């Protein structure tokens, strides 16, 4: 059974978005019904339990986990909530609301947002079977440890390449483009064929208009 990058990316985003919704006063200010809060909390708990089994190689089997079923419930529930919040004219969404809940921001809403000029740095915090956890950080002095994205940055672009150990650095056109993600910490999964190889990660910042900043140097990491 293969790992799905979609599940790992969704896990990273809801870890942030649901925690933010549950923080003091947010659900009330955004007029999110108690029944909806209870629903996403319950579904998040189910997701968490299944994701723990999904990540572990010894329990990563279709018979134990059906990630597809809970994803089919929680993902549309969160997407519908985002649409509901954008459509509610009785509330005013802040920039933090957009960022933390990962709500799509219409380009016309902030036409003067500059193109990113910062190049992210990259580090890895955990390596497990076919999965590497990364932290794309703001290298500005004093900001290196902060998990929040820089001001006016909406997402992080990512591309990756797997090579045999000892091979020369790959050309940029050889990398595989991954979906951009709205969190600074994320997990990238590889296939069984890519395990025990030398990986390279390149990241860049993207603003709400989809404009990309400068790319990082290739960041090497090992897969297991």
Image: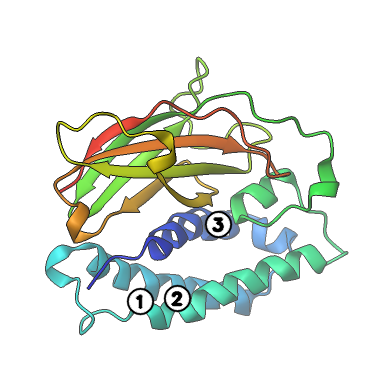
Image quarter of the N terminus:
bottom left
Answer yes or no: is residue 113 visible. yes
Q: Residue at x 69, y 69 (%)?
A: 32
Measuring from the top left, give residue 36's x and y in whole percent. 61, 76
The residue that label 3 is drawn on is 17
The residue carrying pointer 2 sits among few (fewer than 14), some (14 to 19) or many (20 or more) residues within 10 Å by Cα, namely some
Residue 167, placed above or below residue 142? below
Measuring from the top left, give residue 136's x and y in whole percent. 44, 35
Q: Residue at x 19, y 63 (%)?
A: 56
| Disc on the earlier residue, 3 or 2 | 3
The residue that label 2 is drawn on is 71
Q: Residue at x 73, y 61 (%)?
A: 30
- Of all residues, the one furthest to the top in this rendering is 141
Residue 19, placed above or below residue 87? above
Would residue 92 be found to the left or right of residue 14 on screen? right
Measuring from the top left, give residue 133's x and y in whole percent. 31, 45
Q: Residue at x 52, y 43 (%)?
A: 157
Disc nearest the viewer among 3 and 2: 2
The residue carrying pointer 3 sits among few (fewer than 14), some (14 to 19) or many (20 or more) residues within 10 Å by Cα, namely many
Q: Secondary structure at mark 3?
A: helix
Q: CA distance from mark 3 to mark 1?
A: 19 Å
What numbered label is drawn on residue 67? Answer: 1
Q: CA distance from mark 1 to mark 2?
A: 6 Å
Q: Does the CB distance between marks 1 and 2 fall below 8 Å?
A: yes
């Amino acid at each position: 059974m293969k790992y799905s990058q979609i599940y790992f990316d969704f896990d990273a985003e809801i870890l942030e978005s649901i925690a933010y919704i549950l923080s003091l006063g947010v659900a009330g200010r955004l007029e999110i019904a108690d029944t909806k809060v209870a629903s996403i909390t319950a579904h998040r708990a189910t997701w968490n339990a299944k994701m723990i089994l999904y990540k572990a190689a010894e329990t990563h089997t279709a018979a134990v986990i059906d990630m597809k079923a809970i994803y089919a419930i929680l993902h549309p529930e969160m997407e519908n909530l985002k649409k509901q919040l954008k459509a509610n004219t009785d509330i005013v969404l802040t920039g933090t609301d957009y960022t933390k809940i990962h709500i799509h921001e219409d380009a016309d809403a902030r036409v003067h947002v500059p193109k990113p000029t910062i190049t992210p740095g990259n580090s890895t915090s955990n390596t497990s079977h076919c999965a590497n956890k990364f932290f794309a950080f703001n290298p500005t002095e004093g900001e290196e440890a902060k998990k929040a994205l820089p001001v006016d940055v909406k997402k992080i672009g990512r591309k990756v390449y797997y090579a045999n150990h000892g091979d020369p650095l790959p050309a940029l056109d050889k990398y595989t483009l991954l979906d951009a993600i709205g969190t600074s910490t994320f997990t990238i999964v590889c296939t069984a064929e890519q395990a025990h190889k030398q990986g390279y990660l390149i990241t860049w910042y993207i603003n709400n208009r989809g404009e990309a900043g400068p790319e990082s140097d290739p960041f090497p990491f090992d897969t297991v």
